[in-house]
C-alpha cells in the first residue's frame, strides 16, 4: 500500500512551467499605500475626476476596515498577515511612446506571451480569439479591436475605457461589486491599475471568444485588475481569462474584481483557467489569489455562467456569484479546484435569487493532493419574492493521498416556500482499486490518475470552450504529475 | 514430449509464497502453464485462489516473500502491473471497478494503445478500432449503447463480467486470468461469458480459470484442474477431477491434505 501512496506523492510533485521572469524595464511607484499613491496612479492613467474620487472613497473605506482589522478571517485558509505597506501598487513595462500596433510592443513581452502560448501575434489570430493581455498592472495589447468595433463591440483595456467610454464606466463601475463590498474589493477599487472592459451592444452576438491573459512579472508587486463586462439587451458574449506568474519565494497578492451585467435576454459566459504560481513543494512563495467576482442578471431571461478551473495560487479565495434579479434569469457555476503540495483553496459561489422563476446550477469539483486543503463554500439564497426559484447543487471532492483535506460548507437560505432545492455531495478517494484496475489494463500510473481525475471533472470541462477544455485537461495532468501511484 | 521440453513455458511458478498484511496466504505454489493450455484452480473459500490471481497481476498490496515466477522467461515479479499487462497478462476482475466520467470505448482504446506503444506498434486510430470493437461486442452479445456510458458505471453484475471478457477480447492477452468470473452470473450470462472465453482459446494463449464451482467448467472445459487448499496445490488432474469435487465436495481432499502435509 505504501508504494501507491508514494507514487501519489510523486505524481503530485511537478514543476511549474510558467515560472520564468521577463527581463524588461519597469516603471514603478514606491512601495506602500496612501492617498498620494492613489493620486499618482490616477494621474498616470489620466483619469477623469469621478474616477479619482471613487478611488479615494474606496481607499478611505479600506483604511477604516484595515484599522478595524476587518480583513476577512472566516475562510478556511491560513497565511501570515499581509503587510499592505510592503507592496508596489503600480508597475508598468517602460514604454517610450504610445503604441499603435502589436509590432511596437517590447519584443521581450511578446516572447513571454509566446512562451505562455497565447495567440497574441497577429498570425495566430486565426484561432478566433481576441486577446487583451495584462502584464503586471497594465494592459499591453488588445487584438482584434477593429473587427469587433464594426459590430459595436467594445473590447479594450480598462484604462482605455475610462478615457473613451467614461459614461459606460461611470454607469456600471461598482454597480455589482461596490467598493464597500469587502476588504479586498475596497483595496482593489482604490488601487486597481488596469483590466479589461467589454460592452456588447443590443442584439449583438459577439462572434469570437474574448480573452484576457494576466501575467504578474515584477517582484513585490501586487496585481489589482478590474474587469467589467456589460451585455446589453439580447447580447451574447463568451469571455476567457488565463493567468500565470513567475516563480518567486515571497508571496504576491492578486486582488481582482470582476463585474458582469446582463440586461434583458442577454447572456454572458465567463471562463477562467487560473494557473498563478502555486508556491514550491514546501509551500514557499506563490500567489494569494483574493478575488471578488460577481454577475448581475439584471434583465429578464438573462443568463450568467461562470466556469473556472483553478489549479494555481498558494491561496485561492474566490466566489464567482450571480444575483438573479431579472425574472426567469439563470445563474450557473461550474468549478474545478485543484490543490496540491501546500496549496489552499476556499472557493465556491453565491446564488442570490430575487426574481421570479429564477434558477441556478452549481457543480463544484474539488481535488486535493499532497498537503492541499480544498474547501467548497457556497450560498444559495431564495428571497421572499423569488417565487418558483430552483437550485441544483452538486459538490464532489476527490482526495489523492492521505495528507490532504476536503471541506464543504453549503449555506442555504430559503424565504419563499415555492422554492425547489436539490443538494448532492460526495467525497471519494482515488482508490488503489481504481488505479490497479486501469494499470492492469496497461495504463501507466500517471495516465491512470489523469484519466480518473479528468473523468471526475468531465461535467465542468464540457462547459469550457473547446480549446480551453483541452488546455485545462493538460494543466490538470501537469499539476498532478508525480502525485499518484 | 521432447519438443515440449525445448519450448519455453508461458508461465512458470516456482515455490511461490505470498502474504497480505503479514498473513501468509500462498505457501509454496508450483505451477506451469504452456501456451494453448487452460488450467483451472479450484478450492474452498480462503484457500488462496484469488491471491494467486492478484499476485500474477502484480497487485502491490500482496507481498511475495519467496519464490519465482517467469512469464515468457521474464521475471514477472519484477514487473509493475502496467508492465505485466503490456507483456500480455490480463486479469478479469472478480469485482470490476467503476470509473466515472470515462467512456468505455475511450478507455479500452487508450488501454489497447498503451499496450501497442509498449510493444513498439503503431497506435490504433478510431477508424480501425471501431470495426474490430463492434465485432467483439457482438461476440459478448453486448448493447453498444453501454459503451457510451462510463466504465462499468450503472452496469449490472452480469454486464460488468461481460465487459471484462470484452476487454480481454480486445486486448488479446497471452495469459488470461479469470478470477471467479462465474460468481453472480445467471445461466444465460454464464453461457455468453463462456462463449466469449472459448472464442479466445488458441494455441498462443494460456488461461488460468479461478473458480469455486465446477459449473463454469462445464462451459469452459479445462485441460488441467488444480485444487488449492491452505495456500498449496494439493492435487492436480484432468477435467475429471472437477467432477469428482462437484460430487464429493472439498472435505475429503482437505482431510487428505492434512494427513499428508506437503
Image: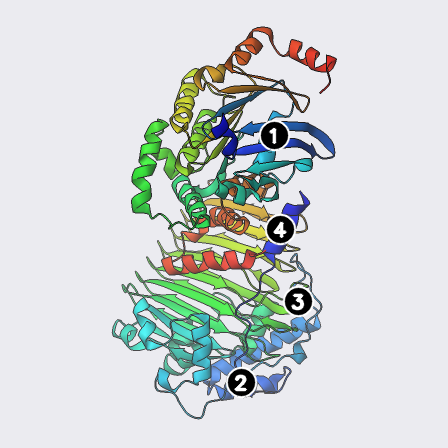
Q: Determine which of the numbered discs, if any, sits on residue A41 in the image.
A: 2
Do the residues indicated by labels 4 and 1 lie within the same chain of the protein? no
The answer to whether A22 appears left or right of B169 in the picture is right
Q: Which residue lies furthest to the front in this view?
A: B2
Which residue is disc 1 drawn over? B52
> Where residue A12 appears, x then y in whole percent?
60, 56
Q: Name the mark on residue A71.
A: 3
Q: Residues under labels 2 and 3: Cα distance?
A: 24 Å
| Secondary structure type for disc 1 | helix
Q: For residue A436, which quarter of the picture? A: top right
Distance from the alpha carbon under mark 4 to that under mark 1:
24 Å
Considering the image in quadrants, where does the N terminus of chain A appear? top right
- Is label 3 in a helix, a strand or a loop? loop
Q: Which of marks 2 and 3 is nearer the N terminus?
A: 2
At 64% from the left and 25% from the top, the residue drawn is: B48
| Residue A320 visible somewhere in the drawing | no
Amino acid at each position: 500500500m505504501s508504494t501507491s501512496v508514494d507514487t501519489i506523492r510523486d505524481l503530485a510533485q511537478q514543476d511549474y512551467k510558467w515560472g520564468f521572469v521577463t527581463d524588461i524595464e519597469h516603471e514603478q511607484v514606491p512601495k506602500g499605500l496612501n492617498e498620494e499613491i492613489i493620486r499618482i496612479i490616477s494621474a498616470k492613467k489620466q483619469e477623469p475626476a469621478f474616477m479619482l474620487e471613487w478611488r479615494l472613497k474606496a481607499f478611505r473605506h479600506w483604511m477604516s476596515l484595515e484599522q478595524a482589522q476587518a480583513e476577512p478571517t472566516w475562510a478556511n485558509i491560513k497565511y501570515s498577515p499581509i503587510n499592505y505597506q510592503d507592496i508596489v501598487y503600480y508597475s508598468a513595462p517602460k514604454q517610450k511612446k504610445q503604441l499603435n500596433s502589436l509590432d511596437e510592443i517590447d519584443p521581450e513581452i511578446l516572447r513571454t506571451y509566446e512562451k505562455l502560448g497565447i495567440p497574441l501575434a497577429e498570425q495566430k489570430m486565426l484561432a478566433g480569439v481576441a486577446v487583451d493581455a495584462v502584464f503586471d498592472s497594465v494592459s499591453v495589447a488588445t487584438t482584434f479591436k477593429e473587427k469587433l468595433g464594426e459590430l459595436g463591440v467594445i473590447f479594450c483595456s480598462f484604462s482605455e475605457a475610462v478615457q473613451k467610454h467614461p459614461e459606460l464606466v461611470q454607469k456600471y463601475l461598482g454597480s455589482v461589486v461596490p467598493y464597500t463590498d469587502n476588504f479586498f474589493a475596497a483595496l482593489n477599487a482604490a488601487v486597481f491599475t488596469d483590466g479589461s472592459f467589454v460592452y456588447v451592444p443590443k442584439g449583438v452576438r459577439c462572434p469570437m471568444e474574448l480573452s484576457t491573459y494576466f501575467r504578474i512579472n515584477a517582484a513585490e508587486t501586487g496585481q489589482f485588475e478590474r474587469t467589467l463586462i456589460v451585455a446589453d439587451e439580447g447580447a451574447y458574449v463568451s469571455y476567457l481569462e488565463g493567468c500565470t506568474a513567475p516563480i518567486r519565494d515571497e508571496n504576491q497578492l492578486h486582488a481582482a474584481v470582476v463585474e458582469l451585467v446582463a440586461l434583458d435576454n442577454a447572456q454572458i459566459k465567463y471562463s477562467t483557467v487560473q494557473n498563478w504560481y502555486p508556491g514550491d513543494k514546501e509551500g514557499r512563495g506563490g500567489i494569494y489569489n483574493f478575488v471578488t467576482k460577481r454577475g448581475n442578471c439584471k434583465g429578464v431571461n438573462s443568463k450568467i455562467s461562470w466556469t473556472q478551473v483553478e489549479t494555481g495560487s498558494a491561496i485561492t479565495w474566490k466566489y464567482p456569484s450571480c444575483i438573479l434579479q431579472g425574472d426567469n434569469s439563470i445563474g450557473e457555476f461550474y468549478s474545478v479546484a485543484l490543490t496540491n503540495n501546500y496549496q489552499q483553496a476556499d472557493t465556491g459561489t453565491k446564488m442570490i435569487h430575487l426574481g421570479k422563476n429564477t434558477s441556478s446550477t452549481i457543480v463544484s469539483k474539488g481535488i486535493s493532493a499532497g498537503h492541499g486543503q480544498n474547501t467548497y463554500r457556497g450560498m444559495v439564497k431564495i428571497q421572499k419574492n423569488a417565487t418558483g426559484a430552483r437550485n441544483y447543487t452538486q459538490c464532489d471532492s476527490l482526495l489523492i493521498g492521505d495528507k490532504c483535506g476536503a471541506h464543504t460548507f453549503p449555506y442555504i437560505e430559503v424565504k419563499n416556500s415555492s422554492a425547489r432545492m436539490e443538494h448532492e455531495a460526495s467525497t471519494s478517494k482515488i482508490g488503489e482499486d481504481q488505479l490497479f484496475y486501469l494499470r492492469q489494463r496497461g495504463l501507466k500510473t500517471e495516465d491512470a490518475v489523469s484519466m480518473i481525475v479528468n473523468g471526475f471533472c468531465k461535467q465542468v470541462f464540457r462547459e469550457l470552450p473547446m480549446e480551453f477544455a483541452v488546455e485545462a485537461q493538460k494543466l490538470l495532468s501537469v499539476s498532478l504529475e508525480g502525485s499518484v501511484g | 514430449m521432447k519438443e515440449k521440453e525445448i519450448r519455453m513455458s508461458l508461465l512458470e511458478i516456482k515455490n511461490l509464497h505470498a502474504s497480505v498484511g503479514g498473513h501468509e496466504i500462498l505457501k509454496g505454489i508450483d505451477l506451469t502453464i504452456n501456451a494453448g493450455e487452460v488450467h483451472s484452480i479450484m478450492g474452498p473459500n480462503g484457500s488462496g485462489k484469488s491471491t494467486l490471481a492478484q499476485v500474477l497481476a502484480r497487485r502491490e498490496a500482496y507481498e511475495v516473500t519467496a519464490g519465482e515466477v517467469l512469464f515468457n522467461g521474464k521475471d514477472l515479479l519484477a514487473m509493475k502491473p502496467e508492465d505485466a499487462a503490456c507483456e500480455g497478462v490480463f486479469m478479469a476482475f472478480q469485482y470490476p471497478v467503476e470509473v466515472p466520467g470515462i467512456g468505455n470505448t475511450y478507455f479500452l482504446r487508450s488501454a489497447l494503445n498503451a499496450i501497442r506503444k509498449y510493444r513498439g506498434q503503431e497506435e490504433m486510430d478510431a477508424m480501425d478500432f471501431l470495426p474490430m470493437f463492434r465485432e467483439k461486442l457482438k461476440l459478448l452479445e453486448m448493447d453498444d449503447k453501454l459503451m457510451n456510458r462510463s466504465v462499468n458505471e450503472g452496469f449490472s453484475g452480469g454486464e460488468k463480467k461481460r465487459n471484462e471478457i470484452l476487454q480481454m477480447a480486445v486486448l488479446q492477452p497471452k495469459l488470461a486470468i479469470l478470477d471467479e468470473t462465474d460468481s453472480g452470473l445467471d445461466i444465460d450470462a454464464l453461457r455468453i461469458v463462456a462463449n466469449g472465453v472459448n472464442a479466445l482459446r488458441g494455441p498462443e494463449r494460456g488461461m488460468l480459470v479461478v473458480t469455486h464451482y465446477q459449473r463454469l467448467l462445464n462451459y469452459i472445459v479445462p485441460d488441467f484442474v488444480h485444487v488449492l487448499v491452505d495456500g498449496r496445490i494439493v492435487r492436480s488432474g484432468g477435467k475429471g477431477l472437477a467432477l469428482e469435487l462437484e460430487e464429493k465436495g472439498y472435505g475429503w481432499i482437505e482431510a487428505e491434505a492434512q494427513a499428508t502435509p506437503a
